[in-house]
């Protein structure tokens, strides 16, 4: 994929202000002063909807609004990759709008600060309703069977223009609970169950 088509900070900074309904999430320059890099975009691909947001990896808190779109009919790899790429672009645009809106008038969208925000959200994590090994989908639940043996990480990276880490959706939930949620610091065995279009599970042993 030609990354020259990927929107730049200057392009996104020129866009109109976000809808008032999105103003409940506040991101300021002060929040990310000092070059904080512990943030990423998370995308959850389900059989019914695709959901995503930018997240502060230190706390698990959303730093953009939660976006949700219907999963394309059939759930083919190319169609889902297209939706994921569009969602990633929109999340980055929202993040840049929020930072720019709170920036001092002296901060240009072409400044090093603006470029650093692009880098801050460079990595994308994608949860799939599939067994995943080394980025390759081994099964397909409630999505098209053509996902099986597809290098999902490479497909989504090509579509979005960003490095993508792809894991099973229930595994992603288990990892999050161990790092920041109900399973944090819990010894022994913890079973995490997910309920959506399908049902998934992740089993943790001493947080692993």
Image (tube, rainbow, N blue to C red):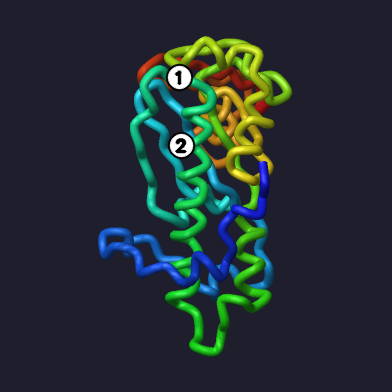
Question: First in sequence: mark 2 or mark 1?
Answer: 2
Q: Position of residue 64 (x, y in %)?
A: 43, 55
Seen in the image, is 199 located left or right of residue 130? left
Seen in the image, is 9 located left or right of residue 50? right
| Camera-side residue of 131 and 88 | 88
Q: Distance between the residues labelled 2 and 1?
A: 26 Å
Residue plotted at (47% across, 28% down): 79
* Viewer can see residue 118: yes
Name the quarter where the N terminus is drawn: top right
- Secondary structure beneath dot 2 equals helix
Q: Nearer the viewer, mark 2 or mark 1?
A: 2
Q: For the view shown, which residue lies furthest in the right direction? A: 134
The label number, if any, that marks residue 86 in the structure image: none
- Secondary structure beneath dot 1 equals strand
Residue plotted at (43% across, 75% down): 101
* Viewer can see residue 183: no
Question: In the image, is residue 121 above or below residue 138?
Answer: below
Q: Position of residue 62 (x, y in %)?
A: 46, 51
The quarter of the displayed image where residue 10 is located: bottom right
Residue plotted at (65% across, 38% down): 158
| Camera-side residue of 1 and 120 | 1
Q: Position of residue 191 (x, y in %)?
A: 52, 18
Q: Where is residue 190 in the image (x, y as percent from the top left)?
A: 55, 21
**Callout 2 environment at 10 Å: few (<14), some (14 to 19), or many (20+)?**
many
Residue plotted at (50% across, 85% down): 104
The label number, if any, that marks residue 83 in the structure image: 2
Question: In the image, is residue 113 above or below residue 165?
Answer: below
| Camera-side residue of 148 and 193 | 148
Question: Which residue is disc 1 drawn over?
Answer: 193
């Amino acid at each position: 994929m030609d990354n020259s088509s990927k929107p730049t900070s200057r392009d996104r900074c020129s866009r109109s202000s976000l809808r008032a309904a999105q103003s409940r999430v506040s991101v300021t320059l002060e929040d990310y002063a000092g070059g904080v890099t512990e943030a990423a975009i998370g995308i959850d691909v389900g059989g019914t909807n695709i959901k995503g947001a930018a997240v502060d990896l230190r706390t698990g808190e959303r730093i953009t609004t939660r976006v949700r779109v219907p999963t394309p009919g059939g759930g083919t790899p190319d169609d889902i990759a297209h939706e994921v790429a569009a969602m990633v672009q929109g999340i980055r645009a929202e993040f840049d709008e929020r930072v720019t809106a709170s920036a001092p008038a002296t901060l240009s969208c072409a400044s090093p600060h603006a470029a650093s925000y692009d880098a801050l959200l460079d990595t994308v994590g994608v949860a799939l309703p599939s067994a995943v090994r080394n980025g390759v989908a081994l099964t397909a639940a409630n999505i098209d069977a053509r996902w099986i043996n597809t290098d999902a990480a490479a497909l989504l990276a090509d579509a979005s223009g960003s490095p993508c880490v792809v894991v099973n959706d229930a595994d992603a939930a288990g990892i999050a609970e161990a790092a920041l949620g109900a399973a944090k610091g819990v010894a022994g065995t913890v079973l995490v169950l997910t309920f959506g279009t399908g049902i998934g599970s992740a089993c943790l042993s001493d947080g692993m």
